[in-house]
Image (cartoon, rainbow, N blue to C red):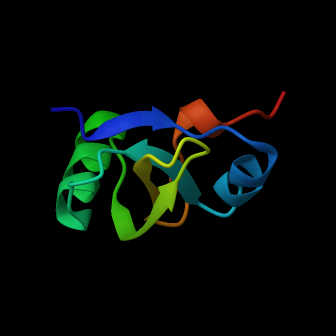
Amino acid sequence: MHILNKPIITERSLTHAKLGLYTFAVSKNITKKQIRKEVEKHYKVNVESVKTIKLKNKTGNLWKKALVKVEKGQKIALFDVTT
């Protein structure tokens, strides 16, 4: 089972990323603890906190979004769009 389905790259999520807050679509039955472990393992960062939100898409299917805050000075390169 995939824990992190995909990163969410939008104008708003990139603005949040500058503040150390990264957004991911995650499996809907995954816990915050599992999300923390997966982000730390996959992206080699230290996670301060995880917030989750359950949402419905246009077809009515449930999905879950995770907002992951990393320690100050650390970043996830995938969200870095500086040139």
Q: In front: 10, or 42?
A: 10
Viewer-nearest residue: 42 or 56: 56
**Nearer to the camera, 1 or 69:** 1
Q: x, y (%) of residue 45?
A: 37, 49
Screen quadrant of the N terminus: top left
Residue occupying image coordinates x 50% and y 53% = 74
Using the rendered view, name the quadrant where residue 20 is placed: bottom right
Residue 68 shows in the view: no
Q: Residue at x 35, y 62 (%)?
A: 47
Vertical comparison of 7 with 24: above or below: above
Q: Nearer the viewer, residue 50 or 75?
A: 50
> Position of 56 compared to 16: left or right?
left
* Image spot of residue 53 (x, y percent): 46, 67
Please tell me which residue is depicted at 24% across the width and 45% down the height of the picture: 38
Residue 8 visible in this rendered orientation of the protein? yes
Residue displayed at 32% across by 46% down: 39
Where's residue 48, x and y in %? 38, 71
From the top left corner, tell me how far across and down residue 12 is, in percent.
Answer: 77, 54
Depicted 47 relative to depicted 12: above or below: below
Say which quadrant the C terminus sits in.
Answer: top right
Numbered disc total: 0
Q: In the shown orientation, is residue 71 left or right of residue 77?
A: left
